[in-house]
Amino acid sequence: MTLASRTGHNGPILALHGVGKKYGPNTVLSRVSLEVNRGEVLALLGENGAGKSTLSGIVAGLTEPSEGTMTWRGVAYAPSSPADALAAGIGLIHQEMRLLPDLSIAENVFVGRLPTSVGRVNRSEINRRSAEQLQRLGLDVPPTTLVRDLRVAAQQQVEIAKALTLKAELLILDEPTAALGGDETDRLFEQIEKLKAEGVSFIYISHRLDEIARVADRVAVLRDGALVATYETAQVPVQRLVHDMVGRPLDRMFPALSDVAGGPLLTVESLTSAEGAFKEISFEVRAGEVFGIAGIVGAGRTELVRGIAGVDPISAGRVLVGGERLSLRSPRDALDHGIVLVPEDRKAQGVILAQSIADNLLVGNYSDVTRGGWIVPGRVQNFAARMIGRFGVKGAPDQQVNELSGGNQQKVVIAKSIARRPRVIILDEPTRGIDIGARAQIYEVIAELAREGMAVVVVSSDLDEVLGLSHRVMVLSRGCNRGVLDQKDAGRIAVMELATM
C-alpha cells in the first residue's frame, strides 16, 4: 500500500499559499506559494538571508508565519511546535548540527522517542537500529560512541541517520552534505532515491549547485525573501540558477592566480600526529602562495592543520615560519609566530554565539581599539563596521552572532582572523554553509591575501574549490602525503587517484 492510498490524498503532499514572515517592520519572507509533490525532491536555492531557513522553519513548526496558510495531505496545517510537525510526519535536519555531545550516537538518534522495555530504555534496540542506519550511510563507528568524540563529518552523518529513523513523509535537508566527502554524499543520495521510491518527499537546501542536477526533481529559487523562479526540472544551467539567486551573473567564480615570487614562509618537516591521524608530513608554502590540501573524509586534513596551529599534539617533526622553529605547546605558540587557523566548526570553535558581532571581531584584536590600555568605543564601532563592510556580513556591529545565518557567522570568523594580520592563514572549509554569491567574495579575499605576501593554506571537501584557488595541491590519504601537484597537473582525476591510494 502506498502512502497516498493510506492517506487518501493524491495531490501535493505540502502546499504553501501566500506564506510570509515579518519581524517588526522587516519582511524576511514575502507571500511565497509553493507545492511539494509526493515522492519528489524539491531543491530550494538562494543566498544567505534569502528566506530559505525561515520557510523551512515555518514548515517544521519552528516559526509562526505572519500571513498565509498551508495544507498537509490536503488538510489545513498550522504547526505550533516542532513536535506538531514530527507528529504529522515532517522532519528537519538543520545546517547547524544540534546534537547532544555528552550522549552516545544511539541516544542522539532516538532522543525524545527512546523505546522502552519494562519501564527502561531498550538500549540494545536503539543500538541495533542506530547501527543499521550508520552502516547504510557508510559510518563504521560503534553506536555507543559519544558524539563529542566524532569529527564534524561523522556528526553530520549522525544527524542524517536520526532523520532516516523518523519514518517521516517529508524530510527537509538543510545543507546535508556540507561536511561530507564524495563517498558519503553518494551514499546519502542512494538513501534519498530509496526513500523517494517509498513515497517520501524532500525539500533539499544546498549551496552546492552541482548536486542539484543529481538529486533534485524540481527547483525553486528565493531571493530577498521572495520566490523568483521555479523550474519543473533540475537540469537547469548553473549560470541561470546563479543569476536567479544573486540577481546578476557571476562570470568568474575563482580569481586569477598571481605569480608567486616569494621564498618558503611556512615549512613543515616530517610532522607526525601524537594521536595517529597523520604521519611524516612534509611540505612548504611560499609567501604569496595559496596551497590547497585535498583528500577524502578521514584522510587527516583537519588533524594536520590543527597540529600545525598548535591545537592537537604532535609526536615528531618540525614547523617553521620564516625559518624559525615553533615549539607548538599550545595555539598561543602558533599565534605568536603569525599562524592563524580558521576552524571548520565555527559554532564550537570560531564564534561566541551569545555575543555581538563587534565583540567577536575584537577577540585577539584589542590592540586595534585601545588607547592607553582602555577600549575606545568609537574605535570599536569603526573597526567592526570596516570588517563587516569588507566581508559583506549581513548584520550590525551590536547584533548577536546567534541571530546570523551560518554563512554570515563564517564571515565573522574569517574577518576576525584576518584582522590579526597573520603571516600564515589556514582556512579549514572556508566556505562551508556560504552561498554562491558570497563565495566569490571570499575567494577574492583569499587571493588578495596571497597577493599581499601571506602564505595561505586552504582545506576543503569541495574539490573544485581547492583546484580553483590553489597554486599547488597536496593530496592526503590515510594520513599520508601522496603527492603535491602543480596547478597545471592538478585535475579532478589526478587528485582522486592519489586520494584513494
Image: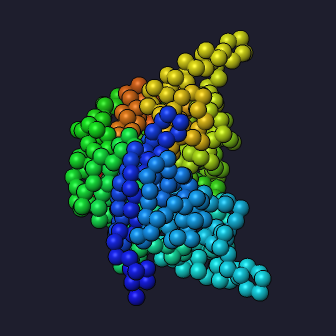
- Along the line of sight, the residue nearer the viewer: 460 or 204: 204
Residue 82: % across, % down:
58, 61
Instruction: Identify the residue at the far right of this view.
Output: 119
Q: Is residue 75 left or right of residue 336?
A: left
Relative vertical location of residue 299 with respect to residue 268 in this rendering, above or below: below
Relative vertical location of residue 378 with respect to residue 341 in this rendering, above or below: above
The residue under the point 52% across, 57% down is: 94
The residue under the point 60% across, 28% down is: 398
- Along the line of sight, the residue nearer the viewer: 57 or 92: 57
Regarding residue 153, the answer to whether it shows in the image is: no
The residue under the point 58% across, 32% down is: 399
Instruction: Identify the residue at the far top of this view.
Output: 372
The residue under the point 77% across, 87% down is: 118
Residue 78: % across, % down:
51, 60
Regarding residue 73, the answer to whether it shows in the image is: yes
Relative vertical location of residue 468 with respect to residue 396 in this rendering, above or below: below
Q: Check the picture and name the quadrant holding the N terminus.
A: bottom left
Q: Check the picture and name the quadrant holding the C terminus.
A: bottom left
Classify residue 256 by image quadrant.
top left
- Along the line of sight, the residue nearer the viewer: 137 or 68: 68
Residue 165: % across, % down:
54, 75
